[in-house]
Amino acid sequence: MLRVKAQLDQRGQTDPVPQIAPDRVFASIAAPANNTANFVPLLSPQARFPSVSTSLVMIDEQGLLHRADIDDVIHSPKGPVKGCGWKVTEEGKTIPLSGRAFDFVWWVRVAYLASSSSPVTITLGDTVVPTGTRSGLNDIYLRIEDSFEEITFSGLDKDTTLCIDKVRVGGTKLGAPL
């Protein structure tokens, strides 16, 4: 746990995924207290555990931070606009997904290129998430507890364009070390 604390303190504000701690760190008999969202903020105030993030991380068995990756259970098809994928403007855009996500806790990764920073509203099923985009190549990670088969983007500022490369829906898994 000291390794996690040191990394969080050094890194600054960090958005970890809630995870069940290994038994050697926190006994499973103590569930649900063994979820990292319950005890990691006590180690470091830098850990936020939000439902919307631009940089999601996970903690491995040794207490090292990794980028979070999303299993590709459901995804968007290739977009119709060459060099852009799915083009989203102030009029908004609904992107179909490869299947229906049943009512469950899902993580969604939206990979995009934005012409400028802007507010944006993302809708999946009955869940409406007001958030924002940053200029350039970025990601938005969303924790969604709902059933859905498409994702809708709306509320962009005038003259802002998003090129959505890929939307992936699934569980989280360890990505590259930080």
Image: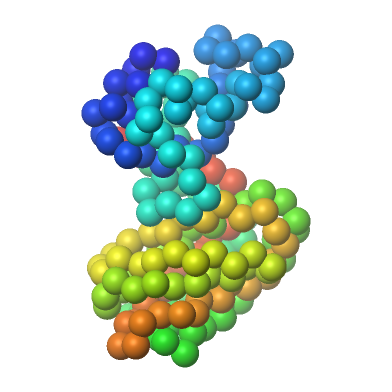
Q: Is residue 10 shown left or right of residue 122?
A: left
Name the residue nearer the viewer: 111 or 25: 25
Q: Which residue does the image show at 40% across and 34% down from the upper left?
A: 47
Q: Quadrant of residue 98?
A: bottom right
Q: Position of residue 59 (x, y in %)?
A: 44, 29
Q: Quadrant of residue 84?
A: bottom left
Q: Which residue does the image show at 54% across and 64% down from the upper left?
A: 129
Q: Is residue 43 shown left or right of residue 76?
A: left
Q: Is residue 97 visible?
A: no
Q: Position of residue 134 (x, y in %)?
A: 30, 66
Q: Is residue 105 above or below residue 49?
A: below
Q: Position of residue 30 (x, y in %)?
A: 68, 15
State which quarter of the image contains the C terminus.
top left
Q: Which scheme is used to colour this image of the protein?
A: rainbow
Give the number of marks: 0
Q: Position of residue 117 (x, y in %)?
A: 29, 71
Q: Is residue 31 shown left or right of residue 85?
A: right
Q: Is residue 10 visible?
A: yes
Q: Which residue does the image show at 43% across and 52% down from the upper left?
A: 53
Name the residue nearer the viewer: 122 or 178: 122
Q: Residue furthest right?
A: 103
Q: Which residue does the image show at 52% across and 56% down from the upper left?
A: 142
Q: Is residue 174 above or below residue 106?
A: above
Name the residue nearer the viewer: 15 or 67: 15
State which quarter of the image contains the N terminus.
top left
Q: Is residue 47 above or below residue 94?
A: above
Q: Is residue 22 above or below residue 71?
A: above
